[in-house]
Amino acid sequence: MNKSTETRANVTLIGSRRAGFGTFMLLLILTPLLLSACGAKPTDSAASQAAGGQAGSGGAAEKSVTLTVSAAASLTDALTDIQNRYEAAQPNIKLEFNFGASGALQQQIEQGAPADLFLSASNHNMQALLNAGLIEAEQEKDWLANTLVVVVPVGGSFSAAKIEDLVGETARHVAIGIPDSVPAGRYAQEALTQANLWDSLQHKLVQGKDVRQVLQYVETGNADAGFVYKTDALTSDNVQIAFDVDPDSYSPIHYPIGIVKATKNQEAAHNFYDYLQTPEALDILTEYGFSAAK
């Protein structure tokens, strides 16, 4: 190849490289403009997937919420039933129940234990939280009513028809809830005091941490009789109701319901609070022996 030919070849090669580089730079500049003109964004698909495919339905999926409900032990069976139905209808809501004696639950809330709602078996314990400003008055009301009965083991040797029968020798142990913390125990103490039997029965009394433990003492034969709510008696095949305690001998049994002021789930808590007062929820509670508060 002569010098003239070689020079022309080099010029052609350089021109080709420059043309290629120029074309690349032109495409680099024009591509974002073309995408913008077409209304496309490189991140649109990823954003849609991150939102769970909700872009077409008006936004991201509804946030899941866990509600902690502190509830009297006597509500265990009824609320478990309600929980199954409510969570099925509200898949974004999970209910976690803390069952126990109302007095113990009151103290837990006073000490800062997490709770969104309080379902008490006594106005006394709810009032303490109202007085402390831990529950708003407009988010609390009487909810249910109950009655007090004495139960005995099925097939047991002891039988009773009235409260005075508990004094007899065949009743060696009588179970009640701890009066200071268990409302059912306080109602039992009132009834025994009215019958002038509280002092004379002290050596027989076996105290339980909540009404369900009292029921268990009778079921297992560790007590010959026990004071429980009628609703608790109806849950067990191992006990039978010996008699209804005279309702005039103890304070009316009301179950108040309230939203804890410190809840971080105000909307979800209020929705469940409202639901528990609906005919649907009250029908379930009636099946377990409760009645709506008057």
Image (cartoon, rainbow, N blue to C red):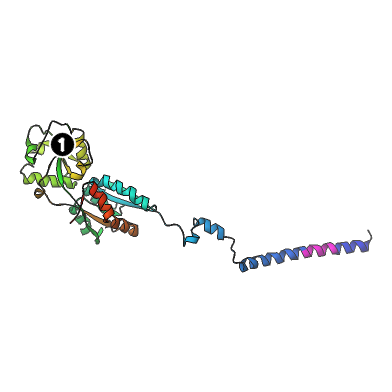
Please provide percent x and percent y for residue 162: 8, 40
Q: Is residue 15 magenta?
A: yes
Q: Is residue 27 left or right of residue 269?
A: right
Please provide percent x and percent y for residue 195: 6, 44
The answer to whether any part of residue 34 appears in the image is: yes
Q: Residue furthest right?
A: 2
Q: Residue sitting at 18 percent across and 44 percent down?
A: 230
Which of 7/68 is in front?
Answer: 68
Magenta span covers which residues? 12-19
Placement of 94 over or under 3, stated as above or below: above
Which of 32/146 is in front?
Answer: 146
The quadrant the C terminus occupies is bottom left
The answer to whether any part of residue 210 appears in the image is: no
Q: Residue sitting at 62 percent across and 67 percent down?
A: 38
Q: Which residue is mark 1?
A: 152
Q: Residue sitting at 6 percent across and 39 percent down?
A: 164
Q: Residue furthest left?
A: 196
Crowd band around label 1 with a 10 angstrom C-alpha radius: few (<14), some (14–19), many (20+): many
Q: Is residue 208 magenta?
A: no
Please provide percent x and percent y for residue 278: 27, 56
Placement of 259 over or under 155, stated as above or below: below
Please provide percent x and percent y for residue 236: 22, 38
Residue type at the position of mark 1: Val
* Element type at mark 1: strand
Predominant SS along the magenta part: helix
The quadrant the N terminus occupies is bottom right
Residue 217, quarter of the rendered image: top left
